[in-house]
Image (cartoon, rainbow, N blue to C red):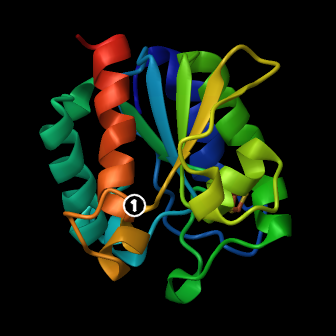
Amino acid sequence: MAKDAFLPLTNKILACRGCGLHGNKILGRGHDKSKIMLISEAPTQEDCASGKPFVGRCGMLLSRMLVEAGIDEDDLYITNIVKCSPPNNRKPKRDEIDACKRFLAKELWLIKPIIVIALGQTAASLFMQSKEKIGKLVGQEKEQYYGYTVIPAFHPAYILRNPSRKDPNKPYLRNLAIFKDIKERFFA
Ligand code: SF4
């Protein structure tokens, strides 16, 4: 994320000490006018080491699902709710999300996606404003006041812990169904 329109935001994020997480800042990556934005909760320690979101085992699994669905990863925009990595890859706390979400709001405003795929419980709960478990939320669609529609999906880390790739009720194939639907609707 370094194109001209993003520079003021990039600079603000890089200078931010707005919560106790402040450390390596991991910015979004991908197509800056994408119709589809993937949003997860926070960068991992692996992301910090590489300087990009969604690398390591989770990133590889996400890439594999996108390839299987026929989606070019470069056509998407991928980011996190908080831009610094919580210690020991824990979930970001409410006050950390509250401190950081202004940056995500600006990314949404700049990119103007049609669909936001909320990856994992934290992102799904935030965007759907729901306390339901991720298994219930996955695949639902909710239109947002700002013009985009949110679809929750499983976080790749969750799929790594529930690895069946044959059972349509398990996370891998449920996510794949979402990505295939996105392919048909937006990239056919
Ligand atoms: S997580 Fe967000 S609010 Fe907290 S220091 Fe990093 S950029 Fe600033």
Q: Residue at x 59, y 77 (%)?
A: 86
Quadrant in which the N terminus is drawn: top left
Q: Is residue 95 left or right of residue 34?
A: right
- Residue linked to disc 1: 169
The x and y percentages for residue 63 are 20, 49
Tell me which corner region of the image, top left, top right, bottom left or bottom right, holds residue 85.
bottom right
Q: Residue furthest bottom?
A: 88
The relative height of residue 4 versus residue 174 in the rendered view (above or below) is above
The relative height of residue 42 versus residue 81 in the rendered view (above or below) is below
Q: Amino acid at mark 1?
A: Asn
Front residue of this view, candidates 156 and 166? 166
For ligand 1, give the image quadrant: bottom right
SS category of the residue bearing label 1: loop
Q: Is residue 142 left or right of residue 28?
A: right
Q: Residue at x 67, y 73 (%)?
A: 21
The relative height of residue 49 versus residue 60 in the rendered view (above or below) is below
The x and y percentages for residue 14 are 57, 50
The x and y percentages for residue 98 are 84, 55
The x and y percentages for residue 176 are 30, 45
Q: Is residue 156 left or right of residue 136?
A: left
Tell me which corner region of the image, top left, top right, bottom left or bottom right, holds residue 115.
top right
The relative height of residue 183 versus residue 14 in the rendered view (above or below) is above
Q: Residue at x 51, y 89 (%)?
A: 88
Front residue of this view, candidates 106 and 170? 170
Q: How many numbered dots are placed on residues in this image?
A: 1
Q: Residue at x 27, y 75 (%)?
A: 163
Quadrant in which the C terminus is drawn: top left
